[in-house]
Image: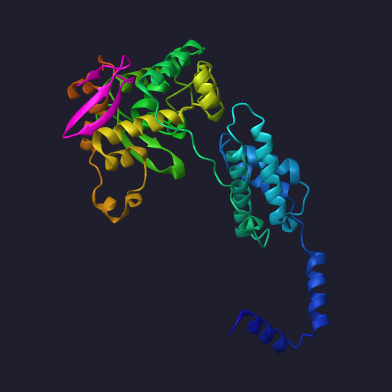
């Protein structure tokens, strides 16, 4: 029996006429409690951290539609607002095209309505009929060794806190972590005995990755020096505050003081691309996927049976950043963060130095 037939059977069983149905619909509409968009947004903001990706979009939604009846918002409205978010974001010189803001607005609005439906505040999600914007081609790629060196030097030259910026640079370069992994790094995530750090990133997924003894020593020393009462996070600014999304925006601005980096929009995420490319060159795509924190299933069924061991990750890390694998265990020996792995063939790894000469 179709849904229409089921509804018709119920109406006939109750003995309701078309007029009765119209009167009932009018009564329900007249007595319905109006829930404003602002009410839904405030509820969502109350549960999200201040540096969450959706926060800016939610503030836009409240500003543009806060007084609207949430039940009467249509897909066309969301599409219009999302494009407005794109246009507004594209005026920012730090933005490449504004599509990220458009996409974030759609996703944030969808999340708001999903939670509201579960709470029984609204009956439908207008975002279900909204198409996600097409992403333009991504210019992000791995940096060359000369570019890496310029990024580091430019970053430090324009920094008010070179020690912190250099430490974050090393953490990003060694682990290929996302900025969320840097921001959320806590004392419990440091494993000095095993020379590993735990990264907690997207969707609260966790993974342990090897780091050099040199980096571990720096992280512990930084945490001890800048320990803020009541905060377990490792990385803090000089004023005691911990890192957040806004700090990373300024981190990118410092990098982009180099003209070529500003033109390309180089950010911390470019370091992730660089390290993952190097790990793939050194140890293959399976190890690179584990480094990236990609699910085992992303490589099909075989990926579930070929999970890299901690020792394999440790070896890939040491081969990339040190001439002698044993140097990774010596806190007095700094890793070479600038060299790049060019290719891997027949077990021989060739590295490029900033001067262009190979290091075998």
Taking the spot 40% from the left edge, 26% from the top edge, the residue there is 143
Percent position (x, y) of residue 221? 36, 17
* In-front residue for pair 90/56: 90
* In-front residue for pair 49/92: 92
Taking the spot 43% from the left edge, 16% from the top edge, the residue there is 150
Percent position (x, y) of residue 157? 48, 10
* In-front residue for pair 55/277: 277
Percent position (x, y) of residue 70? 72, 54
Give the total number of marks visible in the rendering.
Answer: 0
Q: Which residues are magenta?
A: 336-360
Quadrant containing the C terminus in the rendered view? top left
Q: Is residue 342 magenta?
A: yes
Q: Is 305 on the left-hand or right-hand side of 37?
A: left
Q: Is 211 on the left-hand or right-hand side of 7?
A: left
Q: Is residue 157 visible?
A: yes
Quadrant containing the N terminus in the rendered view? bottom right
Q: Is residue 355 above or below residue 116?
A: above
Taking the spot 68% from the left edge, 84% from the top edge, the residue there is 10
Taking the spot 21% from the left edge, 32% from the top edge, the residue there is 315
């Amino acid at each position: 029996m179709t849904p229409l037939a089921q509804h018709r059977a119920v109406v006939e069983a109750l003995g309701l006429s078309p007029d009765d149905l119209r009167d009932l619909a009018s009564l329900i509409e007249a007595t319905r409690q109006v829930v404003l968009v602002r009410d839904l947004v405030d509820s969502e903001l109350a549960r999200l951290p201040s540096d969450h990706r959706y926060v800016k979009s939610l503030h836009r939604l409240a500003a543009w539609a806060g007084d609207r009846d949430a039940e009467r918002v249509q897909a066309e409205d969301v599409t219009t607002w999302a494009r407005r978010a794109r246009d507004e974001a594209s005026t920012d010189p730090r933005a490449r095209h504004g599509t990220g803001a458009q996409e974030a607005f759609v996703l944030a609005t969808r999340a708001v309505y999903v939670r509201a439906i579960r709470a029984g505040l609204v009956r439908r999600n207008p975002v279900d009929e909204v198409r996600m914007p097409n992403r333009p081609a991504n210019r992000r790629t791995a940096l060359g060794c000369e570019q890496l060196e310029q990024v580091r030097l430019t970053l430090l030259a324009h920094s008010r806190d070179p020690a912190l910026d250099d430490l974050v640079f090393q953490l990003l370069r060694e682990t290929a972590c996302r900025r969320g992994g840097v921001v959320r790094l806590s004392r419990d995530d440091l494993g000095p005995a095993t020379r590993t750090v735990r990264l907690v990133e997207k969707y609260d997924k966790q993974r342990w990755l090897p780091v050099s003894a040199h980096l571990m020593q720096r992280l512990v020393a930084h945490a001890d020096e800048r320990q803020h009462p009541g905060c377990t996070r490792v990385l803090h600014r000089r004023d005691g505050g911990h890192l957040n999304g806004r700090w990373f925006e300024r981190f990118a601005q410092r990098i982009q003081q180099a003209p070529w980096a500003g033109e390309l929009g180089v950010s911390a995420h470019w370091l992730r691309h660089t390290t993952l490319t190097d790990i793939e060159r050194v140890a293959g795509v399976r190890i690179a996927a584990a480094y990236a924190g990609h699910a085992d299933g992303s490589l099909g069924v075989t990926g579930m049976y070929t999970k890299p061991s901690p020792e394999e990750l440790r070896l890939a890390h040491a081969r990339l950043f040190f001439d002698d694998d044993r140097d990774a265990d010596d806190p007095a020996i700094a890793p070479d963060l600038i060299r790049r792995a060019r290719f891997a063939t027949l077990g021989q790894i060739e590295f490029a130095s900033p001067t262009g000469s190979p290091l075998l």
